[in-house]
Image: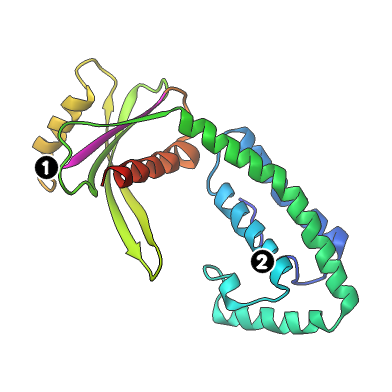
Amino acid sequence: MKTLSSNWFIEGSIDFEHKEYILLSYLQQINQHFHQNKLYPDLNDLVYHYNNLKQFKENKQILQQSFPQRLTQADIEAVKITYERIVEDDALMLEIEQIINYALHKMNPALQEGRDIYEFVENHLNIEPIGVTPLYPYEGYMLLCNGDEQGTRVYEYRINIFEDRDEKYRGINTTFVSQYAKRFINTPEAIRTDLIYTRKNLPNPAVYHIESDIRFPLEQTLLPLAKQCLIKSISKAA
């Protein structure tokens, strides 16, 4: 996918028409993917850039905290030098503010479409635990059915909990295990029994069945949302 650098709006030639071309090319690709119900990684990337622009506009400064995930120390120093040049040039700052306002305005519809698709997919997912849920539900198997596809994908999952001073975060890692053909004998309960019998590393796993009544792109949409759905379900029950 086409990507924007973290400081795309202030690097290189700061010219409105040039930045407009870069932005519209980026958004064109995102909109094409959204129209195909492909959400990721585009939605995360779009949210990232939107928040960066808002932070710059609100704070009028570039800090290391603005780009915690993408910039190296060398990048941060380069941005600070660029910023020092910008703040001394009122005309340049006005040009940047025009670019930022335009970009935020153009990103808004794409963000809303991404959110709408997210909610649409989420509303078409059904999740249920299979068998008795163990006291430790943070590792086990996720059974995933994608609309009218003739099969059930099995993923081993592990949920990790991260804490800082104020909040607790949950992340999930999944590994594809196998796929069961869609037959009357391959019920979620039967798949659970077979997994316990054939995979001894998890003798008493939590097993969740997630099913979509519409087929969605697997890697770009269904799997990421299924993982988030699983985290929400386990968090509520814990």
Q: Is residue 86 left or right of residue 4?
A: right
Q: Which residues are magenta?
A: 203-212
**Circle on res. 223:** none
The spot of residue 179 in percent (x, y) is 28, 32
Residue 55 numbered mark, or none:
2
Residue at x-position 27% and y-position 51%: 158
Q: CA distance from mark 1 to mark 2?
A: 47 Å
Q: Amino acid at mark 2?
A: Gln
Q: Residues within 10 Å of mark 2 (few under 14, many from 20)?
A: some
Q: Is residue 210 magenta?
A: yes
The picture quadrant where one finds residue 28 is top right
SS at badge 1? loop
Report the residue that reaches farthest toward the top.
184
- Residue type pointed to by label 1: Asn
Residue 107: x and y in percent read 71, 49
Q: Can residue 175 be seen by looking at this rendering?
A: no
Q: Reading the chain from its start, which is encountered first: label 1 or label 2?
A: 2
Would residue 219 be visible to someone looking at this image? yes
Residue underneath mark 1: 204
- The answer to which of 29 and 108 lies nearer the viewer is 108
Task: Indicate the position of residue 130 as horizontal and vertical percent values.
Answer: 21, 31
On the rendered structure, is 32 left or right of 228?
right
